[in-house]
Amino acid sequence: MPRETETLKLLRTLLGLYRPNAGEVRRLAEVAKPNKLLLAYLRRVGDVLRGELFREEARYRWFMRNAAEVVDALSRAGVEYALHKFRKPLDHVSVDLDILVRVGDVSRAVKALIRRGFEVAVSEPYTVTLVRRGFIVDLYTNPSFAWVVYMDGEELLKCCVEEIEVGGVRANALTKEAEIAVAAAHAVYKEHMVLLIDCLTAWAWAGKGVWSLAEELGVDKALETLYSICRAIEAGYTEAPHKFSIVTTTRILIEKLAEDPISRATAINMVKYTLKHRDIGTRILSRILRESY
């Protein structure tokens, strides 16, 4: 039987349709946090959790200042890039800044950020991670999991980029429709988990073009999965974050490898990934036990 879940109370609060009582305010904050909606939630109940709101607003300003500096550095260096998993219908504080970069521009992008004080923390196939005073930037050539590509980054850069403003600086970002496709693919293929913010993104920017784009990018089944889970969340059948079972995750990945030539061609990299990361058992257990990403 469907019920009024804590996720639905959070959703209704964000939409201005519900006012949490004194006993629910902090509990719903704990629900909002793993769903990457803490800032939006605190803005709704700020009078009650004023201190938490003040700290989260400060974190948001810090993140946006750093993001603006990063895109300014890339633009000045002539890098072909697009902010990736960045645009959402509600302001949020991310753990890192994800950026798609053309393969031939990776070296230029890294040098541009090093000149701004960043240091390379990790360099792997399809990803370079740089850090400066706690701010993390992930440069991607292709979205991937365990070094297996699940979307064509070059194709995204060709079809789906537009100009937006970030902290007063002009920046290149994926279109809203592309962000839905990316959110679906990221949740389904890489994280094996759907957050409420993923659903809000899919609901807010839905359109016929999303489905044709997802099919063109080879992630239409991921989009179907996302909407199916979001409907279950909206109906009160499950909470968010919604974690996939091991059986579901295995089935989804097998189907992806069978149907996507890019994923299939890079599948051998999974063996290389396992051999390089000797703590693979610990990593898998951590992913199984985690409550968010």
Image (spheres, rainbow, N blue to C red):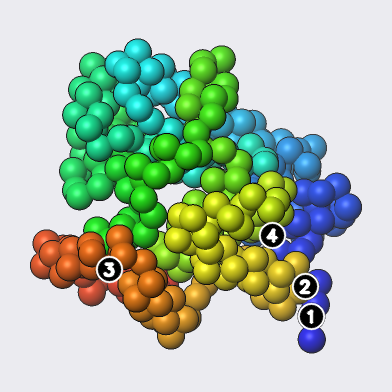
Mark toward the start of the polypeptide (2 vs 3) = 2
Amino acid type, residue under disc 4 in the picture: Arg
Q: CA distance from mark 2 to mark 3?
A: 36 Å
Which mark lies nearer to you, 4 or 2? 2
The amino acid beneath tag 3 is Arg
Going from N to C along the chain, the mark reached first, 4 or 1, is: 1
Residue 31 percent across, percent down from the top left: 64, 59
For the residue carrying disc 1, how many other residues have a C-alpha within 10 Å: few (<14), some (14-19), or many (20+)?
A: few
Q: Residue at x 34, y 76 (%)?
A: 258
Circle 1 is placed at which residue position? 2
Nearest-to-viewer mark from 3 and 1: 3
Residue 168 sits in quarter? top right
Please report the residue visible at 65 percent of the width from the left and 54 percent of the height from the top.
202
Residue occupied by mark 2: 235
Residue with the mark numbered 4? 27
Category of crowding for the residue at label 4, using alpha-carbon neighbours closer than 10 angstroms: few (below 14), some (14–19), many (at least 20)? few
x and y percent of residue 221 in the render? 52, 69
Q: Amino acid at mark 2?
A: Ala
